[in-house]
Image (cartoon, grey):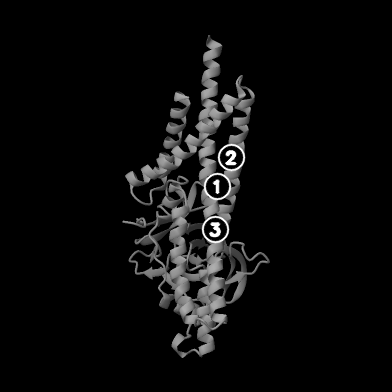
Amino acid sequence: MQIVSTADLSVLRVRTPDEDAPPQCEILRSGRASGCLVPGAVLEMAAQWQSFYLLFTTDDTPFEELLHIHLLDANLRLLDSATLGGIYATGSFSPLESAELDTFRFRFIGDTDWSVQVLPEPGFRIPLWSEPTGVSRPVGFTRHFIVRGQPQPEHT
Amino acid sequence: MQDTQDKSAFDSAIRALEFEIANAGTHLTIDAAARQSYAMQIQVMANELRGQVASGRMTWAQAAQQAQEARNAIMEVIRGRSTPVGRAMAERLKREGKTLNELIARKTQQLHGVSADFNRLSATQKNAVYAEIVKSAGTSNPRVTATMRNLSRAGRGLLVVSIAISVYSVANAEDKASAARRELAVTGAGIGGGIAGGAVAGLACGPGAPVCVTVGAFVGGALAAFGVDFFW
């Protein structure tokens, strides 16, 4: 996958009157607002494969961080999302090298190498069953990317 | 004869449902209360550190370091106060937190731009970076807190349903005083058995196995409740 620079894609945190509300951000393309809002406050990294954009955002709570993974099409329309992390746990995002063009590899939590493989078309999934520990998605039977990882528990 | 058997089976099914509802409601309520306590304690910790810096008893650098250590300590304490199911949920993913230096680098970039170098900042700018770390240490993830708030409501709802079923059972009993004592004993045993069952399952399945611990809590609660009910 090709890394997209912050000059091309960036995010702007949407401020709300309720400070306790889960953070949301708007995706900016070349500094211009796209109207696309996604969960998260900080853009960790953006990558591109074919016409798809993969965005990784966090909530800017470094002591209990969640990683949000968003897949967008060329028009910055949100196709799929997943969240990685859990209660009283935290992670730190860092990208890894990947040989496969459709796959992004990274470290975050659980002492494992995670990967996200983008699917050209949505594939079937079984809710609560098809995802590794720590990965949550909106309810549904399809996914446009597959998250893989073998996370370890705290005391191993 | 058949009617008596049917009524007995119905009462038994209602009781089983009641114990497990009370068990689940108690688990959710305990974990939600622990979460509320966690959010409050980390905020108090951050405020105290800010106060110590303001009064000159501590530098911002010391406050940032202490905030990181205190935050992790509070997290451990709260995990200990959670139910076995809550603890298993918290331990299912090994933490990979940022070191203090990584936090400093990140906050420096957020405050002063991607190319900013902490070592080249003025003393005031460095203190602002440290202050941001203290602020972060006093913040829980709002998404997790919102989820726990919803679970707290669900837990309270389940407890209300459980109490309503108990009241129904007592109201329909011939000896109401005896029925009330029995309800109290059996429901209490169900809740205690649930906690104990979860703890035993946690030991058997190893750390960070929420599914196994939840099954243990369910089975432990049912066994304890039926045991007390049987010998009553």
Q: Secondary structure at mark 3?
A: helix
Labels 3 and 2: the sequence-earlier one: 3
Q: Is residue A120 among the parts visible in the rendering?
A: no
Asked if marks 1 and 2 touch (Cβ < 8 Å), the reply is yes
Along the viewing direction, whichever of A25 and B167 lies nearer the viewer:
B167
Residue farthest along the top direction in this orientation: B1
Answer few, some or many: residues within 10 Å of disc 2's Cα (few below 14, many 20 plus, some between 14 and 19).
Answer: many
Q: Which residue is mark 1?
A: B29
Judge by depth and name the residue closer to the eye, A122 or A86: A86
Looking at the image, which residue is at 50% across and 66% down?
A: A58
Labels 3 and 2 positioned on one and the same chain: yes
Give the chain of mark 1.
B
N-term mark: 3 or 1:
1
Give the residue type that dot 2 points to.
Answer: Leu
Q: Quadrant of residue A37?
A: bottom right
Label 2 resides on the chain identified as B
Give me the disc on residue B37.
Answer: 3
